[in-house]
Amino acid sequence: METSATILHADLDAFYASVEQLLDPSLRGKPIAVGGGVVLAASYEARAFGVRGGMPGRKARELCPQLIFVGGHFGDYQRLGDAAIKVLDDFTPLVERISIDEAFADVAGCTHLFGPPAEIAAIVRRRVRAELGLPISIGVARTKHLAKIASQVAKPDGLVVVDPAGELAFLHDLPVSLMWGVGPATKARLAEIGVETIGQLAKTHSGALERLIGPAAGQKLAALAWNRDPRRLETHRRAHSAGAQSALGRKPAVADVFVPTLLHLADRVASRLRAKDRPGRTVTVRVRFADLRAVSRSITLDQVISATAMLAETAEELVRGVLAAHPGEKVISLLAISVSHLEESAELQLELPLGLADEKRRPGSKRGLARFGADRAIDKIRQRFGKQAVGYGAVALEAARSVPDEFRELAEKEL
DNA sequence: TCTGGGGTCCTAGGACCC
DNA sequence: TCTGGGGTCCTAGGACCC
């Protein structure tokens, strides 16, 4: 077990909002929200009014009438997020990126070059501010969990170092909601038995805890409350599933609506799977009704798929099954497709067997291979001329109305 | 009068096998 | 006729994270 605090958790503050304030100085010091229908990020000035990410735009405006809605510089989000992570890369190769604006780094192996972890963290913060113009908070501790909590405590624009001798003293006064894995539901359950701080959680009988929130979560939280976090940094994480979804507002639950939408979603998912040679076996769809209740259906196939038409048809059958099981639901508000059980990255030869696999599912038909060829042709055109060069007709128009693809891509994980 | 979009992990029951 | 147990896979749903 390490005895010194060498793990950094670096987290850019109010990232999208900070980028917008960087690009347009007239926005600095003002309450701004990135997004429109939904708040994707709020500046600290806006948060002072109670505006939060994920909040409907209308509610945000009610809370803060002078709120300024901005956004859309997706390329800059990606560029600046990458640049911030690169600063960490200058110190150590042990960097685990969590999202566009957040990463862990273990500096145990480079303190002889750059000084103690706290000093490295201070340099990183100075460089990100000087070179990129962005505020970033950093937590330094002996474990990932504690480093992450420390960075949350450090916000905005701060640095918190947790000395190994003072870990539990630091941890136990904090609210349980700061812990990894405690969301609204768990927080409410813990409150039922009077547990509001991490210290109270640590002293809760393990049996009672496991009965309350389940064995896995109970054991995990108990361990974290005593700062026993066995997780190592994972520098090369790959996704285990790939999906796409689209909110529809309120649309009638008819084929004219769900068929073209599913084709568009299947196209997004399948082209990613093909690009990384990671076809998958399990297809899951989600249908959300007017009252926001969601139902899912999945099927695990004998063969992997990555062909757009095949995925679209499979999803269509699943959605028809959902609607048949809920004949009272006449309105849908969201459709989603996800593919899991992904194959490990395959060799080049996969190209032909993949087409043959399609053919195998539909004996006596040439559609499998023909469609496989069409997918490849579309992939190549997009590679050369951009994603918008070729699409699925009317569906492309419909897609333009929802969240821009550039924003979706910011959230995609490496397949 | 629009509640987004990308993921991970856990649970519980049933099917099936040994 | 009833009595037993363990493991794996699949499916549906829920909670959580960024």
Image: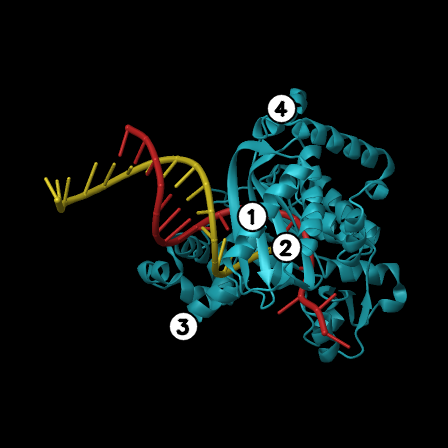
Chain colours: A cyan, B red, C yellow
Q: CA distance from mark 1 to mark 4?
A: 24 Å
Give the mark nearer the N terminus: 2 vs 3: 3
Asked if the residues shown at circle 1 and circle 2 are in contact, with their CB atoms under 8 angstroms apart, the answer is: no
Q: Identify residue for label 2.
A: A335
Foreground label between 2 and 3: 2
Mark 2 lies on a secondary structure that is strand
Mark on residue A192?
3
Q: Does label 4 lie on the same chain as label 1? A: yes
Task: Tell me the amino acid under the disc marked 1.
Answer: Leu
Q: Could you say which is closer to the camera, residue A291 or residue A81?
A: A291
Q: Can residue A102 be seen here?
A: no
Which class describes the residues within 10 Å of circle 4: few (<14), some (14-19), or many (20+)? some
Task: Tell me the amino acid under the disc marked 4.
Answer: Leu
Is residue A77 toward the left or the right of residue A211 in the image? right
At horizontal 71% and vertical 79% (from top left) the residue drawn is: A63
Chain for disc number 3: A
Q: Could you tell me how many numbered marks the image carries?
A: 4
Chain for disc number 2: A
Foreground label between 3 and 1: 1
At horizontal 54% and vertical 54% (from top left) the residue drawn is: A322
Q: Can residue A243 be seen here?
A: yes
Mark 1 lies on a secondary structure that is helix
Q: CA distance from mark 1 to mark 2?
A: 11 Å
Does residue A258 lie above or below A208 as drawn? above
